[in-house]
Image (cartoon, coloured by chain):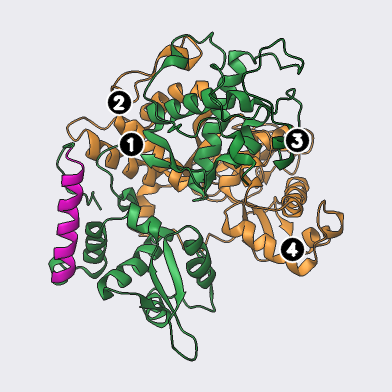
Chain colours: A orange, B green
Amino acid sequence: MWNKDRPVPSYMQGSTRRVGIMTDVHRRFLQLLMTHGVLEEWDVKRLQKHCYKVHDCNATVEKLEDFINNINSVLESLYIEIKKGVTEDDGRPIYALVNLATTSVSKMASDFAENELDLFRKALELIIDSETGFASSTNILNLVDQLKGKKMRKKEAEQVLQKFVQHKWLVEKEGEFTLHCRAILEMEQYIRETHPDAVKVCDLCHGLLIQGQSCETCGIKMHLPCVAKYFQSNSEPRCPHCNDYWPHEIPEVFDPEKEREAGISKSNKKPLRSRQH
Amino acid sequence: MSEQSKDVCDPNFTAEPSNSEVYGSPGVPGGPSPPASQAATLAGPESPPLGPTDASLALPPSQAPSAAQPSPTPPAPAQLVQKAHELMWYVLVKDQKRMIIWFPDMVKDVIGSYKKWCRSILRRTSLILARVFGLHLRLTSLHTMEFSLVKALEPEELDRVALSNRMPMTGLLLMILSLIYVKGRGARESAVWNVLRILGLRPWKKHSTFGDVRKLITEEFVQQNYLKYQRVPHVEPPEYEFFWGSRASREITKMQIMEFLARVFKKDPQAWPSRYREALEEARALREADPTAHCPRSSVSED
């Protein structure tokens, strides 16, 4: 077999960058990350520790950021990467292995029929165009007549929407739908390419923005976790663009320690969508 | 289907990254055509996905480039590399979704008109998967032309124990497999639901994580060969029972079940003495079958 600790040779890299070292620790990590799809940061840290424990119990566990950058340097030539994102509503860091070369909803393609994929695209469009980042069930269902492929009834479409929720592409709150954090992470590139004008962007981090707060004066938007970090312990929050008073409630910065202590399980209800626009 | 088999690049191809002939020099385009069994339904890069009808255009394999039928120019190495990367992702996603990796699908969805070079593409993909992910792309069944991704790393174990504080699909499956194992025979559907009730799962209730639980265990897990769901013979009104599926038998050891039981019920695995003995025997048999010693450690990782 191959030498487990041999660096991935540069002719496979396709570039002259510093070659990352792939050991069994990294390989197992990648395997498990891929298996789980999308993971929260503390799960990722546990995963990393587990991989060290299995293969190299005596080594010091590398800092997660460096660990991931090391792996990404090897993945670069394969057009995939471990991408880090942040959930839009409560600022949890999440990670997923994503394909950078994908320019379509192709990952979903094998799970869904043509008309179902088209329903997703229509829902996606409504979500992007909406003010709140949410599209109502009614509005989505009203578009069933415009779908490509086999004719779909509204009843059927309701079930398809639930299927999207189960597969973690959409999230439902009070009869409205928005993108699951996993979908945003995996499809950001696709979304930006297919909706270059309609897409909203956070004024602070310049990342794709679906939900967030906006300045009522100049209209710039920011992610809730970006707002939380920017205005942390600022008693007089002002818009970074026009300096007008920031009229919204400032959310709290996500604190993983507090989270663990409270023993909040993953299946808890998500916090109410209380952020105004 | 039999027409498709003509298109298999190499029936003996095990997709093992054992030799590096293709990687000796990146300038080598896809290797020589594999021997006799290949149908050469060649078309330009814009051709539509292959269907059964293409096999009827089969040409004898030993075509010289100057033959009457025009053959396409070999693609640039970079294109083959790109195809290998696409195939790698395709295989990873199929495996992530626990779907069958079927060779004709691979050709239709990814390789497409590069079918003639599928051998080298597959080789490169296997090599990448092995080197970067520690996974073997193995042809598990020549008859059905199924591939699967097998872990190449030792020790093999259920890594989900590393993230065991929640109850993902695997947890649900293990619950059922454990029940069947402890019973020593098939588990009636009613018994399974009694156990699942403890977790708050009912056949008629939709669950936030699992969705339609009944569909999941009677259809999806069965489709994935983790469970068998069969009618109990000679029983009226009809009743059904669950057995371990072939995939469960391949992927999950009895010792892992014992460890799962121990964790869930907070008991020593020896609280099920006969089952534990069975698990020990199986573990010994597995060790004897594969004596490549690896770093001895408990297969239950931190919790």
Q: Chain of mark 1?
A: B
Q: Which residue is mark 2?
A: A1
Q: Position of residue A218 (x, y in %)?
A: 76, 37
Q: Position of residue A69 (x, y in %)?
A: 42, 26
> Closer to the camera: disc 4 or disc 2?
2
Labels 4 and 3 touching (C-beta < 8 A): no
Seen in the image, is B130 located left or right of residue B288?
Answer: right
- Per the rendered image, the range of residues in magenta is B273-291
Q: Give residue B152's mark.
A: 1
Q: Is residue B188 magenta?
A: no
The residue closer to the viewer here, A161 or B133, is B133
Q: Please tell me whether residue B39 is drawn above or below residue B68 in the rendered image.
A: below
Q: Give residue A157's mark.
A: 4
Q: Which residue is mark 3?
A: A194
What amino acid type is highlighted by mark number 4?
Answer: Ala
Seen in the image, is A257 located left or right of residue B128?
Answer: left
Q: Chain of mark 2?
A: A
How far apart are the two marked residues, 4 and 3, measured between alpha carbons?
23 Å
How far apart are the two marked residues, 3 and 2, measured between alpha carbons?
44 Å
How far apart are the two marked residues, 1 and 3, measured between alpha carbons?
39 Å
Secondary structure at badge 3 equals helix
Secondary structure at badge 1 equals loop
What amino acid type is highlighted by mark number 1?
Answer: Ala
Mark 4 or 3, nearer chain start: 4
**Pointer 2: residues within 10 angstroms few (<14), some, or many (20+)?**
few
Determine the main secondary structure of the stretch shown in magenta: helix
Labels 1 and 2 touching (C-beta < 8 A): yes
